[in-house]
Amino acid sequence: MSTAAIHQEKSGFWHMPKAFYAIFFIEFWERFAFYGMQAVAVLFFIQKFGLKESEATDLFSSFSGLLYGFMLIGGLLGDKVLGLRRTYLLGIIFLMIGYGSFAFTADVHMLYWGMGMILAGNVFFKTNAGNFVQRCFRPNDPRLDSAFTYFYMSINLGSFFSMVIIPIVAEKTSYGFGIGLCGAGMGIALLSYFILHKYFVENDNETGKTGSGAKKALYMIIISAVAIVAAYFLGLLLRNPHLARVILFSVGAATLLLYFVVRSKQSAIAKKGMMIALILLFQSIFFWVMYMQMSTSLMLFAVHNVRTDVLGIVIPPAVTQSFNPFYIFLLSPILAVWYVNSENKGKPISIPTKFAGGLLVCGLAYVLLAVTCYLHDDQGKVSMLWLFLGYGLYSLGELLISAIGLSMVSKLIPARLGGFAQAVWFVTTAVGQKVGGLLAGFATVDEEHVTNNLDVLHGYQTLFAYVGISATVLAIIFFLFVKPLTKAMQELSKEAIV
């Protein structure tokens, strides 16, 4: 098809390739499962296994960090060994088993094994899902950017419904059963994969389409066996929070060192782009620190210090996390229109501006929550309205940073280093989330020292104030560099980074 014909393709959600809808539907259920677990995991660790709140937040932040630490393995398997569809299928199966196991978790050994299975499943699934989206379209297809926007929408659709449904089910039954229900969601994803199998075959890469099917099946069996064993050892790693921290931060340090080594071998123009990317990556760490508070300190704050009644109906505190995807839906089209109008007026909003602005509004969200703590009642509780407004500011910051993070590294790091660029972004994510979990632990309830709910409130107020003020000050500092960074990126855009 000619380039002219390609650009006459109709855009919009109902004009996508059929294969895209299959991927969209499965992504919905995968995100339903992950965010459903995220909504209640910390409470599950506390109530089922008697962990202290600081131990529970530490465990979940280690789990979240490790989710991003091994993604290159999945990309390698999809690109070079099994092909996309077979690696993708293994991811669905492992995730279904991992989440489903929580419904039957009787002891801590099974808990850690189940979490290890989720980590292994994420390695298989995550990197190959985005690759499938891209392969649904021909080169230069104008619908590709819209497709990734809708793909991001599927993430937030899944997270919104799971963050409402799973906490309610968990409170009516048990937290283990609630997370186990996430496994049922992955069961729907598995069934959908087989029903829509032909679309995954058609859009597989050459590795998946060529070679002996029997040989690939043997590889799948061997890799599955290795992954099950790896899941066990990943579970052991989660049982040792100190070792998990050491490994995550060591990976971060090694990645930074490797980044400078790789940069030293690039052309002058590529070196400049990678230095700009490094500055923006450093900013993003602070965003991920604040992101981790959603499933840790913000959720526990809602448990202890927020009145969660709406018109006389009390909702589970974990449901307040659904405010985030709600705002993502509300704000995404507004920002999209703003970006387009700015482009049309010849005054585009630069990535450095978005990153600094995102960090600022996230910081202001936590400042707002810290101030809100002064408005408590006699029981040390505040209105849920303030938490709702705080999530609004935070979600705006998320759209300004997280939603364009991978786009940023792809623009500033040479295209032939695309896999490396994604890995760097995900390692940055892992480090930030782990630091965020450690910070959340400082505000958690310690029954030996807390005498009343006002003490608990003061702990969260202190945490929110430190996080909010630090992020706000850093954002102001970064704003001082927005103009030179924007100018440098404009100069880079005139030259090809290869």
Image (tube, rainbow, N blue to C red):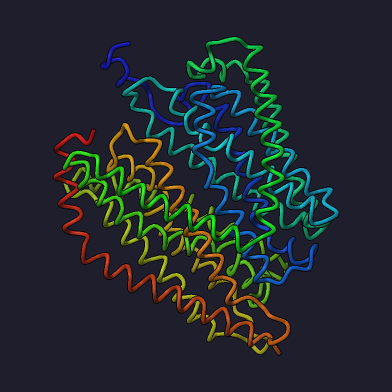
Residue in the picture at 73% in, 47% down: 114
Q: Nearer the viewer, residue 311 or 53?
A: 53
- Residue 366: percent from left, percent from top: 46, 72
Residue in the picture at 60% in, 64% down: 242
- Image quadrant where residue 387 sits: bottom right
Left or right? Give the position of 327 relative to 62. left
In the picture, the quarter occupied by the C terminus is top left
Left or right? Give the position of 50 relative to 238. right
Residue in the picture at 54% in, 60% down: 246
- Residue 443: percent from left, percent from top: 59, 77
Q: Nearer the viewer, residue 469 or 417?
A: 417
- Residue 408: percent from left, percent from top: 32, 45
Seen in the picture, residue 70 relative to 111 is either above or below; the reply is above
Q: Nearer the viewer, residue 144 or 265?
A: 265
In the picture, the quarter occupied by the N terminus is top left
Residue in the picture at 63% in, 20% down: 196
- Image quadrant where residue 93 sits: top right
Seen in the picture, residue 246 relative to 311 is either above or below; the reply is above
